Amino acid sequence: MKKNTPKQKKIPERRCTGCGGTFPKRDLVRVVRSPEGEVSLDFTGKKSGRGAYICPKLDCLKKARKAGRISRSLECAVSEEVYTALEEEIALMEKEREEE
Ligand SMILES: [Zn+2]
């Protein structure tokens, strides 16, 4: 039996590769590996391919990078450029949160 209560609509959750916590998908940054094997950041959540998720926190990025969990999750190597782009984007997001 299902109740139709729109307020309780299930939000898709994903696990952060940094802290290991589970969060609503839209609160996480997605790193995606395209079918061609290219790793990029996905802020729309719509790119196709295998995805890894991370909190928009530099702490989580550091942990995920150190443990190599993003590349393990994507089953391919993650280049320095991807990490740099992630770092920049996450730093920006942290700054925005502070200004709120
Ligand atoms: Zn996290």
Image (tube, helix red, strand yellow):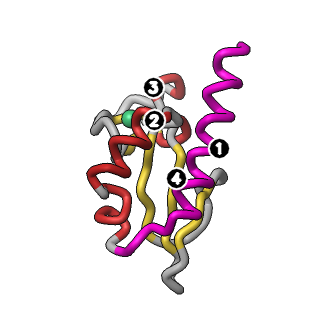
Circle 3 or circle 1, nearest the eye: 1
Q: Which residues are magenta?
A: 76-100
Image quarter where the N terminus lies is top left
The mark that comes first in sequence, 1 or 4, is 4
Mark seen at residue 24: 2
| Image marks 4 and 2: residues in contact by CB distance under 8 Å | no
Amino acid identity at mark 1: Glu
SS type, badge 4: strand
Which residue is at the front of the view, 55 or 66? Answer: 66
Q: Residues within 10 Å of mark 3 (few under 14, many from 20)?
A: few
Circle 1 or circle 4, nearest the eye: 1
Mark 3 → mark 1, Cα distance in angstroms: 31 Å
SS type, badge 1: helix
- Compared to residue 45, the image places residue 50 above or below, namely below
Circle 2 or circle 1, nearest the eye: 1
Q: x, y (%) of residue 40?
A: 58, 65
